[in-house]
Image (tube, grey):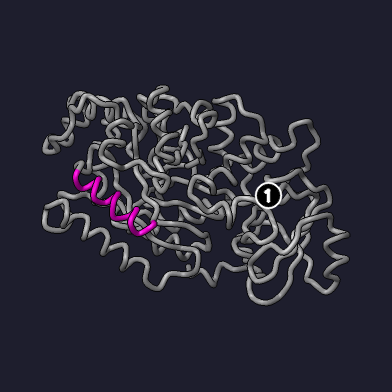
Amino acid sequence: MAIEERIILDASAGKKTIFAADAVFPVSSGAVRGGAVLVEDGRIVSVGEFSEVRGAEPDAEVREYSGCVILPGAVNTHAHLSFRREDGPGYAPFSEWLGNLIERLEENEKRLAENARDGAREAVEAGTTFMAESSPYGGCLPYLAESGMAGTCFAEFFPHESGDGTPEGAVEFIMGRVRELNEGLPPRVDARVSVHSPYTVDPESARLAARRTREAGERLAIHLSESPEEYEFIMKGTGGLADIFSSNPWGGTGKTPVKYGEEIELLAPQTIAAHLATGVGDKEVEILRRSGVAAAHCPRSNENLGCDVSPVPAMMRAGVRVGMGTDGLWSSQSLNLFEETLVAVNLHGFDGETGLRLATLEGARAIGIEGETGSIEAGKWADFAVVEVSPSGLDAEREVLEAAAENGAAATVVGGRVIHERVGG
């Protein structure tokens, strides 16, 4: 389904629209009861009480959501759209799960378009407005682009099957592929490079790819320090991943994956490292802080695949940028980022305000787009979710988060365009 077919209301081209609800939760400031958001040309013009916003623009179209609140759309910092839960290999220790996944890749590829479209629709219906998606060679980019979400597709590459078999050839291949992918895309959707992982990409290819993307001023994604098996492979060169990737001889460095990532120049402010769940102690947190790398936290995937608990509170205290990610449907229960965030809230003992920030503004900060989205502020893109809830307790943000986790979004707005709506406006 093309993006134009999904648009229910377009407030991105020339007209002024007021979105009103029982409350607006900007995240960057306190909640506004009886709040409204004025949108023009896809961006937020003003936020305030409905009477004030309407009084200033009496001729604007009004779209009212009674019994609902408006909050920033979810920013998913790490996802995979190419899988569907019905075909998954089942949760297992990481190396066993990965081996089963590899066996199913060829069959899964035949359903890539269907899977990716269904996954994108699930994310949109859950209130996601920006997604950082990762797929081999950017295969899911067309389906991210047509979903109506803003986002980046990180094209994973595997040097043994890319280019002429040399690190230079592999990196030139993926850089060229990304250039091609970026042609003809809708606004606010792009493609970038992903160094898939320390156990699939050799150190020289990884180093060169990181250098090239930094020189271009582009973001880079990687799975890093995810599982006990990855830790064992990088540290000792043994274990389940060494068995699967027996032709990859660079393990056994005597270093943790984070230290290894630092030494091969993978870690920088432009880098988004997913998982960071195993072997991340105080020294590794300091490396992450010093390098400026951002973290994508995927707690359900980590738990389901036998990985450790990511030290998110310690990273946040150190100043590491942390956002939330769902991972994919073969390793996690859903693509609802608010549901994923509620798991993190319970796991780490966060309050609702922290949880709501992690799902929205902190995710935008992790990706480096906080000046454009992640909170409801004048000048930013009109990216928000409408959630059916009337919070009344002391932790209203948690009530909002719980409602979004359980029921998804009543409406999802990206750049002023209503791309999903369950209740009438």
Does the image show residue 122? no
* Residue at 48 percent of width and 49 percent of height: 367
Task: Return the x and y of residue 49 as percentages of the image width and height.
Answer: 84, 55
Q: In the image, is residue 243 above or below residue 66? A: above
Q: In the image, is residue 39 above or below residue 123? A: below
Residue 420: quarter of image: bottom right
Does the image show residue 357? yes
Q: In the image, is residue 258 above or below residue 50? A: above
* Residue at 30 percent of width and 49 percent of height: 210
Q: Which residues are magenta?
A: 204-217
How would you rate the neighbour count of disc 1 (Cα within 10 Å): few for under 14, some for 14-19, many for 20 or more? many
Task: Return the x and y of residue 125 as percentages of the image width and height.
Answer: 58, 53
Q: Please name the residue that numbered disc 1 is placed on.
A: 71
Asked if residue 65 lies left or right of residue 148, the reply is right
Q: Amino acid at mark 1?
A: Leu
Asked if residue 326 lies left or right of residue 209, the reply is right
* Residue at 65 percent of width and 71 percent of height: 41
